[in-house]
Structure formats: structure tokens, C-alpha cells
């Protein structure tokens, strides 16, 4: 059974350093009888590759890169669904409404991602958990505990232990080599336009929609 815990999480709930360079802004500046075309370009951030001097490091980095690019859409969707749910429930303390909304998210993710998520391997599930923590600042375990109840979170945590995954694991690029590589891969992919950054809902638009 592959990525069981990740499937379970995303079925209930499912930064970019890249700076898009806009079209050059051309200004006409007259000096005497000459007109100069001045092109003002926005600064572009480029993330360098890490030190991959050894064959093993190069192999491991690019294997990890494939996994990150594969699971990124699910991490992005999970983060956006979480942010959307929190925006909808802001200031709402009623447990029943929170659980009801969580069930809606579960149905949405089940209909759109269930079959694809079943193809994930254990190691891809680990990467997915890391990315969810990177994008939300919270562990998968904490999210499940808050929106589906502590008992359910304990169940998934137990299953995670059996299948070599930890829903409590945190993204720590400062002290973990693989996490540092994941950070590098995500930043480079964002800069290259290979993936899209997570979008957070506009609070004003959410309030307007609620008041409509």
C-alpha cells in the first residue's frame, strides 16, 4: 500500500522567489537632438544549483527533483484548499460548521485526485508531507487534528509509522540535506515557470462574497 497516509490526508483536505519579468518598459529620453530608448527591466532572481560534485549527489538530487515536480500540484492544491477553508471559517468557532466544510473538501479532493494519488510511492508521499509543511507552516498531523478530530489524526499517524512516513515531520532546509534540496528545486522550478506558486485568497474578496 503506497502513500496511504498522504492519500487519506488529501482526500479530506486537500513562495515563490520567482519574479516574472514583465515586458520591457521603454522610455523616450531626449538629449539635445537625439532620442534615446531606455529599457527598464525588473530584477530576476536566479537560484543556483547546490554542490553536486559527486555522482551520488547528482543522482540523488535529480531523483528528488522528479518527485518534487510530480507531487507539487497536490501540495499546492492542499495548501490552497486549507487557506480557502480558513478564510471561509475566519472567526467561526462552531465545530459543526468546520467539520462540514472539511467534508466538502474531502469530497472535492476525492473526486479530483483520488486515482492519481494512488500512484504515489512511499518516498513521494514523504516529499508531499514536506511540501505541505513548507507551504502551510503546519504539519499534516496538526491539520488533520484540527479539522477532523484528534482520534482521526492518531489513526493516520499510526498508519504513517507502519508505512515509514511521519505526518508530524517538519520541513527543515537549514539542517536537513534533502529538505535543502527540495527548497532549491522548488525555487528553481518556480523561476523557470515549471510550477506555479501557491495562491492565497484575498481577504477582501472573501468578505465580499460572504456579504453577498
Image (spheres, helix red, strand yellow):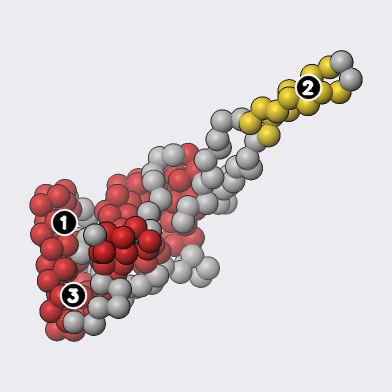
Q: Which residue: 32% across, 64% down?
A: 207
201 relative to 184 in the view: left or right: left
For the question of whether residue 91 can be seen, the reply is yes
Check disc 2: other Cα within 10 Å, few if <14, some if 14-19, many if 20+: few
Determine which residue is flagged by label 3. 98
Give how far across and how far down residue 138 sits, in percent: 35, 72
Give how far across and how far down residue 209 sits, in percent: 27, 59
Disc 1 from disc 3: Cα separation: 17 Å
Judge depth for marks 1 and 2 and give the one in front. 2
Is the Cβ of the residue at disc 1 closer than 8 Å to that at disc 2? no
Disc 3 from disc 2: Cα separation: 60 Å
Q: How many marks?
A: 3
Judge depth for marks 1 and 3 and give the one in front. 3
Residue sticking out furthest to the right: 32
Residue sticking out furthest to the front: 212
Q: Which of 148 and 167 is in front in this view?
A: 148
Determine which residue is flagged by label 1. 109
> Which numbered dot is residue 56?
none
Q: Give the mark nearest the N terminus, 1 or 2.
A: 2
Disc 1 from disc 2: Cα separation: 55 Å
Res. 24 image quadrant: top right
Is the Cβ of the residue at disc 1 closer than 8 Å to that at disc 3? no
Determine which residue is flagged by label 2. 36
For the question of whether residue 161 can be seen, the reply is no
Q: Give the mark nearest the N terminus, 1 or 3.
A: 3
Res. 126 image quadrant: bottom left
Position of the N terminus, as image quadrant, is: bottom left
Check disc 1: other Cα within 10 Å, few if <14, some if 14-19, many if 20+: many
Q: Which residue: 51% across, 46% down?
A: 18
Q: Which residue: 51% across, 70% down?
A: 175
Amino acid at each position: 500500500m503506497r502513500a496511504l497516509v498522504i492519500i487519506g490526508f488529501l482526500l479530506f483536505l486537500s513562495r515563490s522567489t520567482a519574479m516574472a519579468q514583465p515586458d520591457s518598459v521603454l522610455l523616450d529620453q531626449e538629449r539635445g537632438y537625439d532620442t534615446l530608448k531606455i529599457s527598464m527591466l525588473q530584477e530576476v532572481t536566479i537560484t543556483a544549483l547546490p554542490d553536486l560534485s559527486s555522482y551520488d549527489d547528482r543522482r540523488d538530487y535529480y531523483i528528488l527533483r522528479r518527485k518534487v515536480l510530480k507531487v507539487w500540484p497536490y501540495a499546492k492544491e492542499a495548501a490552497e484548499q486549507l487557506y480557502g477553508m480558513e478564510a471561509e471559517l475566519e472567526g467561526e468557532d462552531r465545530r459543526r460548521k468546520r467539520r462540514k466544510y472539511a467534508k466538502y473538501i474531502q469530497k472535492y479532493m476525492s473526486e479530483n485526485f483520488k486515482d492519481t494519488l494512488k500512484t504515489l510511492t512511499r518516498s513521494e508521499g514523504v516529499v508531499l508531507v514536506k511540501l505541505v509543511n513548507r507551504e502551510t507552516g503546519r504539519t499534516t498531523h496538526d491539520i488533520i487534528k484540527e479539522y477532523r478530530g484528534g482520534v482521526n489524526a492518531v489513526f493516520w499517524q499510526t498508519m504513517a509509522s507502519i508505512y515509514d512516513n511521519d505526518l508530524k515531520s517538519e520541513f527543515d532546509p537549514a539542517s536537513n540535506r534533502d529538505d535543502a534540496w527540495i527548497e532549491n528545486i522548488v525555487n528553481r522550478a518556480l523561476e523557470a515557470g515549471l510550477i506555479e506558486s501557491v495562491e492565497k485568497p484575498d481577504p477582501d474578496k472573501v468578505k465580499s462574497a460572504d456579504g453577498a
